[in-house]
Amino acid sequence: MKVPAHERSRIPRRADDHSRAAAAERMEFIREAVGARPEHIGRFSMDPAVFAGNVENFVGVAQVPIGIAGPLLVDGEHARGDFYVPMATEGTLVASYNRGMKLLHRAGGVKVTVTDDRMQRAPAFGFDSAREARAFGQWVTANFDAIRSEAEATTRIGRLLDIEQFSASRYMFLRFNFSTGDAAGQNLSGKATSQACSAATAPARCASSPRSSPRPSCAVRSPWARRWSRRNGSTRTSGSAGTGLS
């Protein structure tokens, strides 16, 4: 029986798709399909099962040169002591960091303070007039608990801390600030904000349904002045009194 061409080009999948056997089968498929023999990426020490949910069609790992710099003497609120730092970077930088860490160590180390910790998403809502935008902001303030319940229903660890408001004529910018536990929270905060916005823009809750767009004022890849005072993620300051550096 002849196998259809599209079947011959289909990447192999298995029920136990994150396994060494599945990775080996796909590696053999690549050899036959393109004539390449990528031997090194198939040599790895980790159990492929740990990659479930992180990568599909797993075949192996890429090896990256790593150097060590340190020790870096840290006086932090959660970490204290000497730390050796693994770094995957370009030539000469590990040596440069190593010299800097040596200087800081001799000066007494680095004192680190966490000043804020929040992940944000900032949708914008456009209305027919500034008056409607203002009314929407008042509605958000009055219904914060309900909005928070909608947002937190999408996550086990995320918590909506507050919603900041910034008006600009007939537009209302909302900044949803989340605590995300040990997670970075990029996907978490996006999903939670989307759910909250869906509830906020329901026609039954607004005199005129706002037109929303995501993230114009987020401190992520955007040249917005407020990002310097309203940073995204964990905000830390560090300095060394011995060197006068901070």
Image: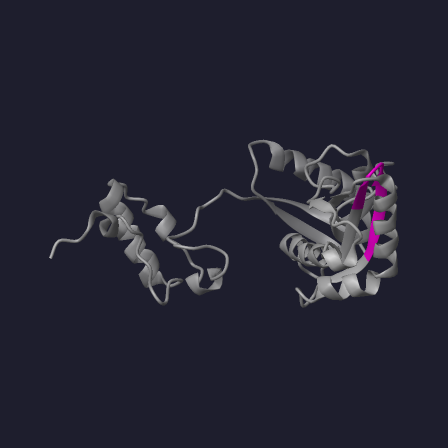
Helix, strand or loop: magenta stretch: strand
**Whole-percent x, y for residue 9 in the image:** 26, 48
- The residue under the point 78% across, 42% down is 127
Q: Is residue 151 left or right of residue 241?
A: left
> What colouring does the structure picture have?
one colour
- The residue under the point 85% across, 36% down is 169
Total of numbered circles in the picture?
0
Q: Which range is magenta?
A: 162-173
- The residue under the point 66% across, 53% down is 190
Q: Quadrant of the N terminus?
A: bottom left
Q: Is residue 82 magenta?
A: no
Q: Is residue 202 left or right of residue 91?
A: right
Q: Quadrant of the C terminus?
A: top right
Residue 212: image quadrant is top right
Q: Is residue 170 magenta?
A: yes
| Vertical position of residue 48 compared to residue 218: above or below | below
Q: Nearest the camera: 199 or 162?
A: 199
Q: Nearest the camera: 80 or 162?
A: 162
Q: Nearest the camera: 234 or 161?
A: 161
| Vertical position of residue 65 compared to residue 198: above or below | above
**Whole-percent x, y for residue 85 in the image:** 64, 48
Q: Nearest the camera: 98 or 33?
A: 33
User: Can residue 187 be seen in this snapshot?
Assistant: yes
User: Can residue 114 be seen in this snapshot?
Assistant: no
Residue 87: image quadrant is top right
